[in-house]
Image (cartoon, grey):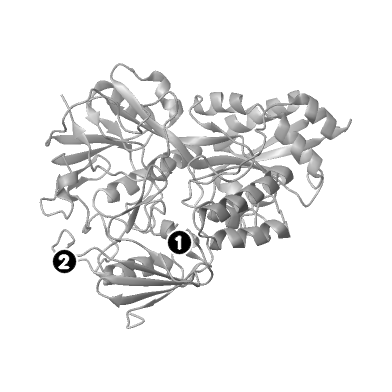
């Protein structure tokens, strides 16, 4: 799985002006994507609104919503957690500046709006007034400066640190309710980095000392009332919450289970009302008369990266042959129960607002493979972690049927990611299969995976034309100009095929039909969620 943080240092200057990705298992990545991935529209097998299905009715207030999740793999820490349980636990108490919505727009939360100056380098965010933390401390710009300064500090271990590196220069407090961000370079999607799509950007009080589970202070709709380690966390609705009208339930119990099977049994029996996040393939055993699915596309995917700087993949025709050899619908069916979206070897996910136009959809075409290989027999090995064995084996089978000679090299998760940028198998083997969790902006993927010299460029790809277009894409603000750049970048990636993306993985959440309004959103937002009979 893709690293979500970069071990190298990051530093962002915080001024109070006055100028006042760790590797994850496949299950862990998919669950995290369910908790934080981008929801755009539901698949054909799901409720098309993206919310839990059920009979229409007037929302009712009251009741305790029982959610199920697995025991967190590490402590609950809003700054460093990438575990889906840890994130969900914090999202009930803490908020973001903006919420990334189902249609890929940003909803104001603690930030009211964002604006950028003509240079594209200075972003200004006015803040919501009249908000307090649950200890009655007022929310002001100081909380934003301390929270984001903590994420971007030198030696920060937050997954969010890498998203700001090379983009954010300084954070300035203009007054108690205005914050200004100066960038190193224009980046039109910068507000998305301040949203729930960048899941560790929680706003914490300036006094936060690092032990969230002991003193969980936030501006959100619930307070933590009980924390029984390894068993449950209980929450009560805040009557003084600034947006109390959105919250219908009186409380939440987050029940913890040792594994997915135990959690699914609890959902089936009615012990819990919903999962904090789900995996599409887990739904096969559920009783659909009682359980419904909220689902939609995300920017989570598994990439087959091909080393473009050495044989056999220094030949573009060989890379294209690999891409045309795959039966993507079959991959979707086996790996994702056909809940995902077929990929087309560019990085613009179904959940992003702008996608390339005019590209033919790739699928299995053995005649084209034959023409591209021109009688050559190509042999290579796919290196993958133990968590990608099923996916790798299916690709091996399809490629072998198309005439390739493919071996598999399976490593432990630890071994797969071990080493430096120049020695780690996932970055240096001739072909690698790596899962990438959702990102709020396609520019992040381009910067990580495709730009010349990028730290996580496992294909060792270099194309000066793409590098120049990526800089322009980061700076563009008009939709028309953006579409043109996306078309060009998409075409380059489709032609060059440094990475094959067979399918895009969905966001999924299974819920009891008596629960209404709970979608598969990127954050656990209980606004508008209510419990029926």
Where on the picture, by quarter, is residue 145?
A: bottom left
Q: Quadrant of the C terminus?
A: top left
61 left or right, relative to 121: left
CA neighbours of label 2 inside 10 A, class few (<14), some (14 to 19), many (20+) = some
Quadrant of the image for the N terminus? top right
Against 125, residue 106 (above or below) is above
Say which of 352 and 12 sits in front: 352
Element type where label 1 sits in the image: helix
Q: Is residue 223 among the parts visible in the rendering?
A: yes
Q: Secondary structure at mark 2?
A: loop
Which mark is drawn over residue 190?
A: 1
| Residue under the image location 73 percent in, 26 percent down | 365
Label placed on residue 523: none
Q: Calculate the distance from the C-alpha at mark 1 to the C-alpha at mark 2.
A: 28 Å
Considering every residue shown, the one lying at the far bottom of the view is 18
Q: Residue furthest front?
A: 480
1 vs 2, front mark: 1
Residue 63: percent from the left, percent from the top? 13, 35
- Mark 2 lies on residue: 137
> In the image, 445: left or right of 408?
left
Q: In the figure, 367 relative to 376: above or below?
A: above
> Horizontally, is 393 left or right of 6 in the view?
right
Q: Residue 334: which quarter of the image? A: top right
Residue at figure coordinates x 47%, y 40% from the top left: 298
């Amino acid at each position: 799985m893709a690293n979500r943080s970069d071990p190298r240092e990051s530093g962002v200057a915080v001024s109070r002006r006055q100028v006042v990705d760790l590797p994850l298992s496949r299950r862990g990545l998919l669950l995290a994507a369910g908790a934080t991935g981008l929801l755009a529209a539901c698949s054909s097998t799901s409720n098309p609104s993206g919310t839990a299905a059920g009979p229409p009715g007037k929302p009712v207030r009251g009741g305790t919503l029982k959610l199920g999740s697995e025991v967190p793999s590490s402590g609950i820490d809003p700054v460093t957690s990438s575990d889906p349980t840890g994130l969900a636990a914090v999202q009930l108490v803490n908020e973001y500046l903006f919420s990334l919505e189902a249609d890929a727009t940003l909803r104001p939360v603690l930030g009211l709006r964002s604006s950028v100056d003509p240079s594209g380098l200075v972003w200004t965010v006015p803040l919501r007034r009249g908000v307090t933390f649950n200890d009655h401390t007022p929310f002001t710009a100081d909380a934003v400066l301390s929270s984001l300064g903590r994420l971007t500090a030198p030696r920060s271990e937050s997954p969010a640190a890498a998203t700001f590196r090379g983009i954010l220069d300084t954070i300035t407090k203009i007054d108690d309710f205005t914050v200004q961000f100066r960038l190193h370079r224009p980046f039109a999607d910068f507000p998305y980095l301040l949203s729930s799509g960048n899941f560790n950007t929680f706003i914490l009080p300036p006094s936060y000392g690092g032990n969230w589970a002991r003193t969980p202070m936030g501006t959100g709709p619930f307070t933590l009332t009980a924390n029984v380690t390894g068993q449950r966390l209980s929450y009560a609705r805040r009557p003084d919450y600034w947006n109390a009208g959105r919250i219908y339930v009186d409380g939440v119990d987050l029940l913890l289970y040792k594994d997915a099977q135990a959690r699914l049994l609890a959902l089936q029996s009615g012990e819990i009302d919903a999962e904090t996040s789900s995996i599409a393939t887990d739904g096969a055993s559920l009783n659909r008369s009682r359980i419904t699915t909220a689902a939609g596309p995300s920017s989570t995917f598994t990439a087959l990266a091909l080393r473009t700087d050495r044989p056999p993949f220094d030949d573009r025709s060989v890379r294209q042959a690999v891409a045309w050899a795959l039966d993507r619908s079959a991959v979707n069916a086996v790996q994702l129960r056909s809940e995902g979206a077929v990929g087309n070897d560019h990085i613009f996910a179904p959940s992003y607002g702008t996608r390339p136009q005019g590209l033919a959809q790739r699928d299995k075409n053995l005649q084209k493979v034959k023409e591209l290989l021109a009688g050559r027999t190509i042999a290579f090995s796919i290196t993958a972690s133990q968590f990608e064995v099923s996916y790798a084996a299916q690709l091996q089978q399809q490629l072998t049927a198309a005439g390739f000679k493919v071996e598999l090299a399976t490593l432990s998760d630890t071994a797969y990611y071990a080493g430096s940028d120049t020695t780690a198998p996932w970055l240096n083997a001739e072909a690698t299969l790596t899962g990438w969790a959702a990102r709020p902006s396609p520019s992040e993927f381009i910067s990580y995976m495709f730009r010349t010299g990028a730290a996580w460029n496992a294909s060792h790809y270099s194309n000066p034309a793409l590098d120049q277009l990526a800089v322009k894409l980061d700076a563009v603000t008009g939709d028309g100009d953006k579409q043109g750049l996306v078309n060009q970048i998409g075409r380059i990636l489709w032609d060059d095929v440094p990475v094959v993306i067979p399918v895009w993985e969905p966001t999924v959440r299974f819920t009891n039909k008596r629960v209404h309004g709970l979608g598969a959103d990127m954050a656990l937002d209980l606004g508008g969620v209510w419990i029926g009979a």
